Amino acid sequence: MARPVGSGAASTQSPYLQSIFLNGLRWADRHIFFFAGLSFLLGILSAHSSSFHLPNSLLLGLALLFALISFACWMKGQREDWFSLLLLLPFFFLLGALVLQHQLERSLAKGHLARLLKEQQQVTLRGTLDSMPEVRAEQQEGEEVYISRFEIEVEEVQLHESETSWQSVHGRVRLSMQGKNDALQPGMALIIAARVGPVTAFQTPGAFDYQQFLAAKDIFLTGWAQSVHVLPEQESKGLAGAAISMFHVLTFLPEQVRQQVSHFLRENLPGPIAGIYQALLVGSRTGVSKEIQEQFKATGTMHLLAISGLHMSLLALMVGTILGWLLKRSERVLLHTHVPTLAALGTLPILLGYSFIAGMNTPVLRALIMTLVLFAALILRRKRSLLNILAAAVLVVLLRNPLTLFTASFQLSFSAVAALLLFLPRILPAFFEEPVKRKTGTEQRSWLARLWQGFLLPALLVSLVASLGTLPFALFHFHRFSLIGPIMNLMVEPLLCFWALPWGLAAIPCLFIDPEMAIVLLKIGGLGIEAGHYCTALGADLPWASLWTITPTAGEILVYGVLILLWCLSLRVTVYRRTLRSAVFFGVGALVLHFTWGFFVSENYEGSKVTYLDVGQGSSNLLQLPNGARVLIDGGGNRMSKINIGERVIAPYLWQQRIWRLDQAVITHPHRDHFNGMDFILAHFRPRQLFINGDSRIEGNYQEIIDQAKRLGIAVVVPRSGEKLQEDHNAVLRVVGGGGQGKRQSWESVNDASLVLRYQHGQRSFLFPADIGKQKERELIRQGPLLVADVLLAPHHGSSTSSSATFLDAVDPSLIVVSAGKYGKKHYPSPGNLTAWTERGLPVLITRAEGAISCETDGEELSCLDFRGEQQFLLP
């Protein structure tokens, strides 16, 4: 009987697919720890979303239920059945959600200091210094000033405003104080007079979330200390008291050693070398100048200034090799013991000590956990699975604090290691096959070929694989990647990690025994630091050393991860390999096209979007027009701030909005709080035109920004009143005041000479009056209908010098937005203006409270949302 065509193929493929399924189950059974860690991680992500919230008691009950069912199945003899292990996955999922909710509620726990201090106020704190003071140098009015930053575990507090007595509380507070404060040591009992309040951050999408960053360290309050008084040590009585005293000493000993090492480096080495050595040895980058950090970032070598698994591996290798060599000198030891086990046991205390001295950050903790598990497998003669070890490290780190999952350190550290574990075992053999014998029959190679294949090529492959693994997270957090990163790592990594770091580690014990010898060792290692700094400085000056990009979406990151896994699968299987690789290449092309589409094509919108950014005490507003044009009106923040508001807030928002380029930028007047971030914006978003008011009464680096614009080929234009900056068929951005007025600016104040802009789309309009005062308001009233607006940006941040009643009558707004920060809370907006607005029934949104405020309109309906996406205002 004839067999149907194709049945043979089906009969051969079906068993093959079945074998793939069974092999997949066996692999999952062997790597159950990996799936447990993944389930735990997904549980944290679910709990972090606002849509998922269950009572802690219910989560705990469900988790225990799944654990008991799984244990019952396992006890029934189904130990080889994957179903019993599968039931553990919901347990870890619920456990992840539970630990995150518990962490988020810590600041709300009874007796926590954060429950008392809902806003910044003057207090006196009594507690224990919990960390070494980190010292950084700042330039203030041409002089170098030192600022110390430290953390205190609070035990009691006295509130000045309520004049209460001491209250027992708990919680950590991060404080800053002027001076080096080297006399303060971790473990000291202190009384501190300080101004303390909740952690604040710029509530603008894309900006660095400082609140979440500190919450991952269990810090919910920050402040500025005015005075510190050290309490005398109490004498311990009895054995119990002596034991408590000894425990106290041992608890803070690592931080005290960190402080001594940091102080020794700062006092005995030149500034740049001391700063980089502090980063390598004690995990503190406060001594590394912004210029040097930028050079390391531009060359893709910034991770070398963070203590990571590489540092731990080098230390373990160095100590293990020395101990192994010493132990092998004894014949008795060789005959009666297992030398690798003894060497591993001897290495562990040193690794633990270094981990504590390094500050026990996420990369260090991950490397320590993986090292401990590897050593345990070696000692117990157990089979080692690196993927399970990585999963164990994930679980331990996230159990310690689940908010760590959302930090750049965690994501970059674990993604790099995961990429190395997945790809290196498959890639390296392809590059290190046995060389083909020459016709002469010899296999000798030149020293250059041996160097290339023995060190340079493996190091380059490791750098490339780690860079590919961390790429989406690096773009998400830092919006840049270095084109020369793999090559620069090949040059700088040996200088810092294989030369400077070993000499520095050897100097630490000498520091307490023979300080002169420690200085000699550090200076020898400093040669590698100087060479590494020289390389990064040269690399950073290269054109296109690094590229800045928009923020990838969660979907793009997910697709990237899937493509990585498919490529890894194609390295493991023989059947369908060509199909898998074709799919990967097609997916990469589609992903790159989707990611860069906005760079080449201007996207048109159905409506308009106006966003008032939260930049602190300053002003910056983005207009997105229906024709696809993007206009930035002002780009400044707090005048006294040391950060570049353009780099830290405005640019991340633009990248988060998928904006590669701006069409136009406007500086309404030359005051720092309206332009001090514009230098970064001009350099990275290259608008075609920069509009200014032409006022010669400038401050700060305003002229440098104008010169920068001209060097970049950006047209600097002084528009005249009534001129249209942008125009579509039903949308227009127009200058309604200021600009091009020549002699009038000589008697007008700088604020009154500001450019005043009005944007209208259909029936809806927005007015941007910059910092004009009441005198200029009276003049603008003559504009009549051209001044009417649905949304008014409060003039001069709501100051009492503006917002006159006649001006409000002329504008007739339905909503007032105030761009103001926390430091101007008493004056911006002024209490008088707030009262007047309230009496008029006008809703008021303030950026320091609501965060970035975005308004969208199609020309008829108008809606405004705050930073959290909650609808605050709707005008039909």
Image (tube, rainbow, N blue to C red):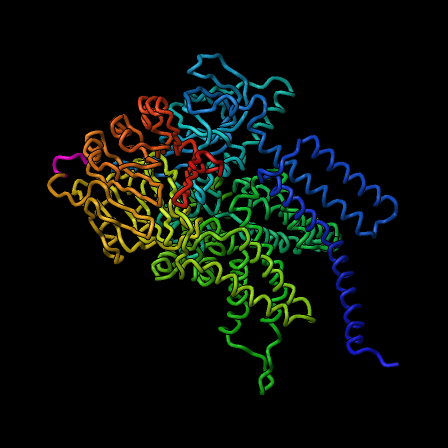
Quadrant of the snapshot with the N terminus: bottom right
Q: Position of residue 198 (x, y in %)?
A: 46, 28
Along the line of sight, the residue nearer the viewer: 319 or 433: 433
Q: Is residue 521 visible?
A: no
Q: Is residue 702 left or right of residue 461?
A: left
Q: Is residue 245 left or right of residue 288?
A: right
Q: Locate residue 833: give its quadrant.
A: top left
Q: Position of residue 468 (x, y in %)?
A: 53, 59
Along the line of sight, the residue nearer the viewer: 87 or 401: 87
Along the line of sight, the residue nearer the viewer: 684 or 493: 684
Q: Is-magenta flag for residue 749? A: yes
Along the line of sight, the residue nearer the viewer: 48 or 412: 48
Q: Is residue 126 left or right of residue 798?
A: right
Q: Is-magenta flag for residue 618? A: no
Q: How many marks?
A: 0
Q: Locate residue 28: give its quadrant.
A: bottom right
Q: Is residue 693 visible?
A: yes
Quadrant of the snapshot with the C terminus: top left
Residue at 25%, 27% (x, y): give it. 806
Is 768 placed above or below 448 here? above
Is 590 placed above or below 690 here? below
Q: Position of residue 529 (x, y in %)?
A: 41, 53
Residue at 59%, 47% (x, y): give it. 366
Is 186 placed above or below 674 here? above
Q: Position of residue 86 (x, y in %)?
A: 76, 48
Q: Which residues are magenta?
A: 745-750
